[in-house]
Amino acid sequence: MIRPRYFFSETFTSLKRNFFMAFTAITTVAITLFIVGFFAVIVYDIQGIINSIKSDVELAVYLEDNISEELKKYIEQEVISWKETDAVRYISKEQALERFKKQNEGSDILKEIEGNPLPASFEITLKNPEKIDQVALRFYDKDGNCIEGVDEVIYGRKYVNTLFSITAIIGTIAFLMVIALLLAAVVLIFNTIRLSIYDRRKEVEVMKLVGATNWFVRIPFLFEGFFEGFAGSVVSIILLYFICNFLLIRGERLIVDTMRIKELAVVGSGNFLSYTYIGVVVLGGLIGLLSSAIALRRYVKV
Amino acid sequence: MIELKNISKIYEDNTVALKNINLVIRKGEFLFLVGPSGSGKSTFIKLLIKEIDESNGNIYIAGRNICNLKSSRIPQLRRNIGCVFQDYKLLPNKTVFENVAFALEVIGKPDYEIKIQVPQALKLVGLYSKSNSYPYQLSAGEQQRVSIARAFVNRPPILLADEPTGNLDPGTSEGIMKILSRINLIGTTVLMATHDRNIVNSMRRRVVELEEGEIVRDQKRGVYGD
């Protein structure tokens, strides 16, 4: 009863004969999925930038000059034992001065320094920078004074909190936009395939008239929808490939070189691009298939 | 072969298309369904192929009540009923051969059967030589003959024709009627809805006249009427 050869040849002759409709559908899929894919890459990219900024967030714990060795050791051990801690670096008074000199090379301020006014400190980076507030609080006692041996804790609370709320907003907006684009893509593709089915309602009418089963009527349309989605997504991948490799990555290198932000060129790194490609193809095929299925249900009562 | 018991059809907008129709059509019969436009002829035919559902009553085809047929069984019913329409319903992007073969392909007939049956059907309607033409290259009468070949290629026991000569001139119509008679002679039950007075009068077959959804006349070897 089921003859695969018929369905394949029927799918492709109909694609050939309804070239214009097929072309429209494929182009629609290609353009919309390209935009979705491109946006996904950009979002991922921004996320990468945000993450690298986040990882730069650190907590500086300035120590009193007269702190005992034991207390220093104790504090260090304690900080290392916290689960939020990623790394702890001890900066001695000498190292601090060294660094200060380097940062202010050639400046008059250096001449005015007598002795070493800079405190020793622990610089703490966290696994999850969002918890920085909680960690900082541990260096204070109930009354809000610093614990023994600690002079001051600095981490730019305002800056950090704003950064986190901004990144959260950007992340949400970007996610919503990708979803919206995806929906627009589905609607566009669905409409195109619906038109192509409407265009061939006569054929469907005849098929039903001569006693074709419902599945027999549906399958070529489903094949066609799938093929159009698939072909469109392949085209969009090719576009994405060129855009990402020749524009994005180069552009980012330029930014990285000029702004000296480390680990920014995330587009080129990792498997994200490959995942995007695979995702786009799967999405294209699925959208094509689903669109035809829905269009069939609604417009060809079989 | 076909039996209608108390069949009524009321459309959603409350138009009554058929009222209490009782009719028996025997196997091998040739029957004209006549009456003015809107008298219910098309509704009658649509009910037989279950394109629409009856509001009331029962229809038996070959002893089977088709009114409680599951929708998945409808294709099977249609494979046993050939249909010819006023507007031919040919697919413009398929050749004559492909149009006829299409009817066999969609019911899953293998290629070798298609290669035998399609030429036979085309010979029956006298269009074998135009197998590779496209519908637009044919005259109206030829297109209708292709649609008859398509309706008959599967050798259904019943052939329904809804105004098959509605768009044709008298000479061409006569050719169509000859083909339908030939098909009837092989043993096929033919039911033809028409308001073509001359054809009905010249054929002298059973005539059932509908008026406002009711049978007003059922005559053996009848004429069109007043």
Image (cartoon, grey):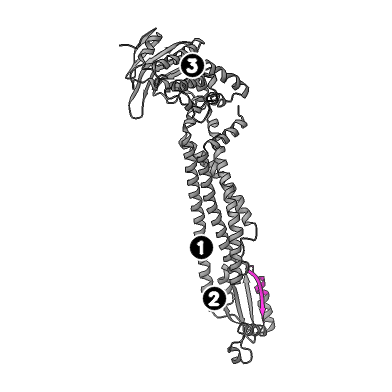
Vertical comparison of A294 with A32: above or below: above
Q: Are marks 3 and 2 on the same chain?
A: no
Q: Image height check: is B92 above or below B20?
A: below
Q: In which quarter of the image is residue A99?
A: bottom right
Q: Could you tell me residue A244's position as x and y percent?
A: 59, 58
Q: Which chain carries label 2?
A: A
A240 w.r.t. B212: above or below: below
Amino acid type for the residue under numbered disc 3: Ile
Residue A250 percent across, percent down from the top left: 61, 63
Q: Assess whether residue A151 is covered by the magenta stretch.
A: no
Q: Which of B134 and A183 is in front in this view?
A: B134
> For the magenta stretch, what is the residue range?
A77-91
Asked whether the viewer can see residue B98, the reply is yes
Dot in front, 1 or 3: 3
Q: Which chain carries label 3?
A: B
Residue topped by disc 3: B158
Q: In this view, does B224 lie to the left or right of B191?
A: left
Q: Dots 1 and 3: beta carbons under 8 Å? A: no
Residue that carries the numbered disc 2 in the rendered image: A156
Q: What element carries label 1?
A: helix
Taking the view exactly as shown, the residue that stands out farthest to the top is: B221
